Image (spheres, rainbow, N blue to C red):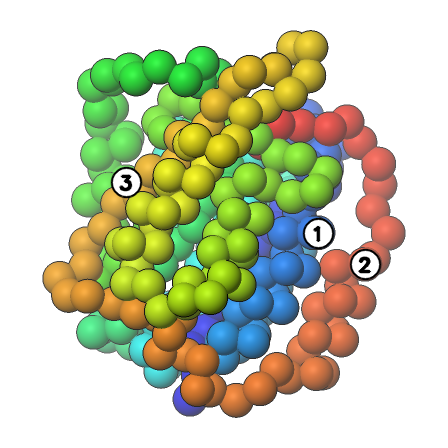
Amino acid sequence: MKNRALIVSVGNFYPEAGLNKRNGVKRDSRRLHKILTKLGFSVDIRIDIEAEEIYEAFKAESEKTVKDCFVGIISTHGEEGVVFGADGCAVKLAEIYSYFGGPSMVDKSKLFLIQACRGYGLDGGVEVETDSSSSEMSELFSIPIDTAVMYATSPGYGAFMHPLGSVLIQTLCDLLEKEGGPDLEITKLLTRLNYQVAYNFQSRGKMLGGKKQMPCFVTRFTREVFPFMDSRTAAAEDLSLTFAATQLIDEPRRSRKSSIS
């Protein structure tokens, strides 16, 4: 039995959805697959799937057995409380989280990373205070115990996407490849991730130059958790999975406009 990870990456949307192409998602998915597999996770990648398929994928994962830890990563366009499938339909994050409170996931560690916008604001690098909306509170209440959720940005703000990959996911991969990175307790790892993105990233360009990104995370862990250290003793990389995932990721896609999220 292995730890498992599900990566849902949506970079290309149906024309009628009115959502821009997200360059860089393939690079994120490839690197995540390589690192997580090396750390002993069984990794499943889903590319450009519709909203209902996103629900189904996470529902199926929540009903399987897992060794110690499940990692779910969603990279797509989003707004506060929702992310979007390739068909442009909304996926409620609260519903995704609620799946993992069932008997199959009791006493298991769950980590979600959401690489998506949570609004349309652009962070100029100053601290702001906002009242929590009812949808945000509902989303937080749906997070089951022994779970942490890492968001690419604060409520109400946009998350940046670059053709070389998102700053959140690429920075996480850097930390997991660094000596001692996988040995970090999860809250310490996520705090370092916050620091690296907040202080080392700044957008460029005529329109968006100088903007910052401040990730944030929520945890309902009641104990110290070392998900990446514990999994490194698992079996080596499954070459057939790597080949299948690479083929899927490398499929030609229709070209669209670039996006920041």
The residue that mark 3 highlights is: 139
- The residue at the far front in this view is 179
The residue that mark 2 highlights is: 250
The earlier-in-sequence mark between 3 and 1 is: 1
Give residue 193's mark. none
Q: Do the residues labelled 3 and 2 touch (CB within 8 Å)?
A: no
Rounded to the nearest angstrom, the CA distance separating label 2 from label 1 is: 8 Å
Question: Can you tell which quarter of the image residue 47 is in?
Answer: bottom right
**Element type at mark 1:** helix
Viewer-side residue, 1 vs 47: 1
Give residue 26's mark. 1
On screen, residue 29 versus residue 62, left or right, reads right
Query: In which quadrant will I find the N terminus?
Result: bottom left
Q: Which residue is drawn at 53% across and 63% down?
A: 177
With respect to residue 193, does 47 lie above or below? below
**Element type at mark 2:** loop
On screen, residue 133 versus residue 4, left or right, reads left
Q: Where does the image place residue 152, in percent across and percent down from the top left? A: 44, 38
Q: What residue type is labelled 1?
A: Lys
Question: Can you tell which quarter of the image residue 208 is in?
Answer: top right
With respect to residue 174, does 259 lie above or below? above
